[in-house]
Image: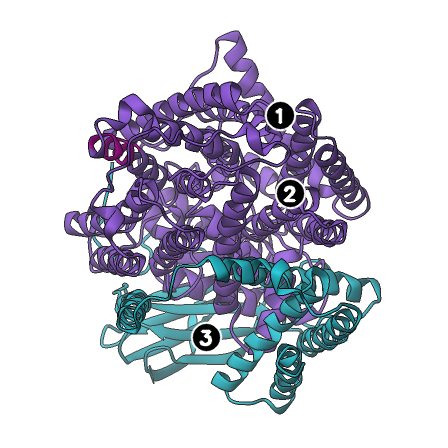
Amino acid sequence: MVAMGGSVSSREAVRRPGRAEPAREPSALSRVPISVIALIVAVGVFVSSAGYADGRAGAGSHSVPGIRLFWIGQVLILVPVAGRLLSRRSLSNGGTVTLIAVVTVAEYLIKVNYTPLGFAFNDEFLHWRNTTNMLATGQLFEQNWGLPVGTWYPGLEEATSALVSATGLSVFEAGLIVAGIAHLLFICFLYLAFVVALRSHRIAGIAVLIYTGTPSLTSFDSMFIYETLALAFLGMCIVAGLRSSIDRSPQERRRWFIIAVLCIFATVLTHHVTSYVLTAFLVLVAVASRLTGSRNTAIRFGILATISATSVILWVATFARSTISYFSPIVTGLLHGLNSISTGTAAAPSVVPTPSANKVLEYGGLLIVTVLILVGAWQAWRRHRRHPWIIGMMIGCLGFFGFVAIRIATPDGQELAGRSATYTYIPVSVVAALAITRLVNSGPVRRWGAAVTGAVLACVVTLLIDGLSNGWPPFWERLPGPHQVSSFESSIGPEEIATADWTLSYLGPGNPIAADAGIYPLLLAYGDQDALQNVSFLYATPDWVPAIANEAAYVIGVHYVLTDTRLTKLLPLNGTYFPGDQTDVTKTLPVANLDKFNHITGVSRVYDDGNIVIYNLQSLGYVPQKP
Amino acid sequence: MYRRNLDILLAAATALAGGAAFAAHLPGAAQIVLGVALYFAPGYLWSEAILSQRLPPTERLLTSAGLSLILPILGGCLFYALHIPLLRADWVGLLVVLTLLGVVAVAVQRLREAPADPRQDPTAQRGGQQQPARKGGMSALNAFVWGVAGVVALGSVAFSVKSAEAQKYAGYTMLWLTPVPAAGDPTPNAAQPKFVLPTQASLGVTNHQGVAEQYELKFLTKGKVTATWTFTLSDGQSWVKTVAYAVTYAQVANLYLLPNASTPYRTANNGETSLPTAAPTPTKTPTPAQSK
C-alpha cells in the first residue's frame, strides 16, 4: 500500500493511488513474519561467516566452496528483506524500520566477522593510533603520521575514548561498538529523513534498500573511521532540520533546530568531507524549497546552511588548515581527469584485471540506476514538482553522473567514486525508489502481479550484489586467507603486527621508515612510525648507487629500510609493492635488490625474523642528514 | 509523578554507579555494563530535556543514541578549551557531570511543563490506532524466533573468532641488535634528531615458531666469538640482554636454531661488516595463493 499522504510543504502534491485500482496480490514473501525473516538473515550471516572460515582454512579467495557459502549467505540476507520491502502487502512503519535495521546489522556483523580479532582495514589503523594517542596523552590533537589531517577531526577518537574509559574495553572493542552504532544510526536516520520528507514509509524503505547497494556502505561507511560517525550526525541533522521546518508547534521546531545545530558542530569536528556535504545538502534543500515556494523550509535550511558553512570555514581557518593541502592533490587530479574527459584523452586507470562477472554486475548496476533515475526524475517532475525535498533530490541526482565520470575516467577513479558514492547515492536512492514504486504500482504493469514484483526484486538484488562485489574488500580478498604481499588486509598477520610492535618498543616512535605496502599501515598504527610513501626507488636496483643514497638521505630522509623476502616470491594482488606507486608490477623483485642492504658498510641490520629484515641507514658511517 | 520521573532516578543512579565502578576498579563485566549505561545516560537525558517527552519510541531511541555520541565530542572540545586533560578519569568525570546536569535539565523541564496531554501524544495516538494485541502464543513464538535469530547471529561472531584464532600462520623467530641511545632513553624520539653515539645495545630473541625451540646465540666481535648463549624459549617467550655496543669495529649476532648449529638462522649486526651473499635461512613461505 502506498501511503504517500503529503510532503514537507504541500502534502497534496504527492498523489495517493486511485481507489479504483484493483486489489494487490501479496507475494509469498509478504506473508512471512518479520521475525522469521530475521532468522533467515541470521542464518545468512552464519553461512557467509562459514565461507570466511573456509577461506582461512587454506585457499583464501580461491576457495570455491568458501566463495559459494559467502554468496549464498548474502542471498539469504538480501532476498527476504528486499522481497518483503518491495512486496505490495502493507508493512507498518515499525516493520519497515526493523527490516532495515536487520539488514544493516547483518552486513555489519559480516564485516566484523571478516577480521574478528582486530582491525585489518587500513583506515581503521590510523584511527586506532589517534585514539590510543588520545588516551595516553589526554590531548586532542596528537601527531598522526599516517593521517595528519585526521588529527584535526577528533570526533571519532573522542567518542571512542569516552567509551573505553567508562567501560575498560579495548580500543578495538569500543571502536566496533561506536562504529556499529554510528552505522546503524546513519541508516535509520536516513530512513527517518525519507519518511519525514516523503510521508511514505514504504517509499522510504525502498529508498534505503536501494541505498544499501552503495559500494562503500558495507565497508568504508561501517569501518572504524571518522566518516562512519560523521554520517550518523549528517543523517540526524537532516531529520532535525526537516522536523524544525515542519513540526506544528513553534516550540518543537526550536528544539529540533537546537538538535540540528548540535549535529552540525559534531559533524564539523568529526569529518571534513561529510561537513562539506552536509553544508551543500542544506543549501540544496534551501534552494529547492525556495524554488518550490516553501518559504519556511527555505529559511530554516538557509540558516542551518549558514551555520554549517561558517563552522566549516572557522574550523579550517583556525585549526584544520592542513585540510587544504590534504585535498589539493585530490582536487587537482580530479580536475585533470575531468579535463581529460572533455578533451577526449581520458584513459581508464591501470587496475588489476577484474573478473568479467564483476564487470557485468558493475555495468548492469550502472544501467539499472541510470534508468531508474530517468524514470524517477520524470515521475518527480510530473507529480511532485512542488515538493521541495523531491525536487532537491532530483537536482542532487546530477551528482551521480559526475560519480560515473570519476569512476571511469580519473586516476584512482574507483576509490574516489566509491567514497563519493556514499553521498551521491542518497538522492539517487530517493528518485530510484519513486521509479520503482511507480513501476510496481502502475495499472498496466500490475496485471502481471508477482512477475513484475519478481523482476523488480531481481533488479534490486542485482544492485545490492553489485555494491558488495565491487565494494571493499575486492574480489581477490573476498575471503580472509593466507598471507599475500602488499595486498591490504591480506597482508596483515601476526608476524607483521609483532614487527610493528617491535619498532615502537625498540626504535621509538616517528622514525622515517621505508617499507612495502603490506606492513605500511601497521608501521603507521601499531609502530607509530613515519612510514614513507614513494620509496620504490630504494628497492629498484641491485646496487646502492650514489643517486639512490642521495635521494634516500636528502629527498625523503629515510632512517630505516624494511625488506621482506616474500616480495621476491609473490606478486602483489593489488598491483604494486610499495605505497604511492602507480604502475603495476609484472614480475617479482630480484633477491639482489633486497640483499644489497647487507653489503653497505655502515648500514646495520637491526632486526631479522626470517622474512622481514630492518636496516638502520642512520647508524655509524651512513648518517642521512638533510642539507 | 514517581513513575513519570523514574527514568531520571535510574539515569542518576546509573551515572553514580558507573563513576563508582570506575573508581573502585570493579571486575570487567560489571564495569562494562555500568560503563555502557553511563555512556548512554547523558544522551537519553539531554534528548528528554531538549525534545520533551512526546516523541515516538523509535525517534527517542535514535536521538538518544545520537546525542550520546555527540556529547562526548562537544564536551571533549570544551575540556580542551579549558585546558583540562582528557585522561580516562576525566572522560568518566565528563560523562558523570553530563548525566547529572541532564538530570537537572530534565527535572526543570518537567517542572515547567504541564503533564503531557495524552491526546497530543503521538505515541499514545499510535497506540490507540493499533490493531488489537495478538494472541499471547503468537507473541511468545515471535519472541522465541527473534531470540533464536539473535543467538545464531552472535554465534556467527563466536564462530568467526574461533576460526580466526585457529588460522595457521608460518612460524618465525625475531632477532634484534638495536643500539640504545647513550642518554639511556630506550625510545628515542625522531622529533629530537640529535645523534648521540650509542654505547649499549639491546640484543634479543623472541620465539613465535608455535612450539618451544632451543636456540644458540653467538655474539661476534671483530669476527671472533666473544659470547655464546644457549637457551630454550616457549612460544611467545623472549630473551633479551644488554650488550656493549661498538661504533668502530664489527659486531655480529648469529642465532642458530638447534640442532642446526652450523648455519645461522637469523643474523643482526652493527653495520661495520657486510654479510656474505648467502642470506640466513629464510622462514618457510606458504604456497602462493595466486601469482601472475
Kindly identify which residue carries mark 2: A242
Which stretch appears magenta? Answer: A451-459
Disc 2 to disc 3, C-alpha distance: 62 Å
Q: How far across and down, in percent of the image, does residue B288 sit?
A: 23, 48
* Residue B107 in view (yes/no): yes
- Local crowd size for mark 3, using a 10 Å CA cut-off: few (<14), some (14–19), many (≥20): some
> Is residue A547 toward the left or the right of residue A589 in the image?
right
Q: Nearer the viewer, residue A409 or A45?
A: A45
> Is residue A301 toward the left or the right of residue B257 in the image?
right
| Both marks 1 and 2 on one chain | yes
| Both marks 1 and 3 on one chain | no
Disc 1 to disc 3, C-alpha distance: 48 Å
Q: How far across and down, in percent of the image, does residue A380 sit?
A: 50, 23
Chain identifier of the residue bearing label 2 in the image: A
Q: How far across and down, in percent of the image, does residue A408 sit?
A: 43, 22
Shown in cyan, the chain is B
Q: Nearer the viewer, mark 1 or mark 2?
A: 2
Color of chain A here?
purple
Q: Is residue A319 magenta?
A: no
- Residue A547 placement: quadrant: top right
Kindly identify which residue carries mark 3: B204
- In the image, what residue type sits under mark 3? Gly
- In the image, what residue type sits under mark 2? Leu
Disc 1 to disc 2, C-alpha distance: 35 Å
Q: Nearer the viewer, mark 2 or mark 3?
A: 2
Give me the disc on residue A332. Answer: 1
Chain identifier of the residue bearing label 3 in the image: B
Give me the disc on residue A279. Answer: none
Please tell me whether residue A250 is drawn above or below residue B13 in the rendered image. Answer: above
Q: Nearer the viewer, residue B239 or A622?
A: B239
Q: Which residue is outermost to the left? A: A65
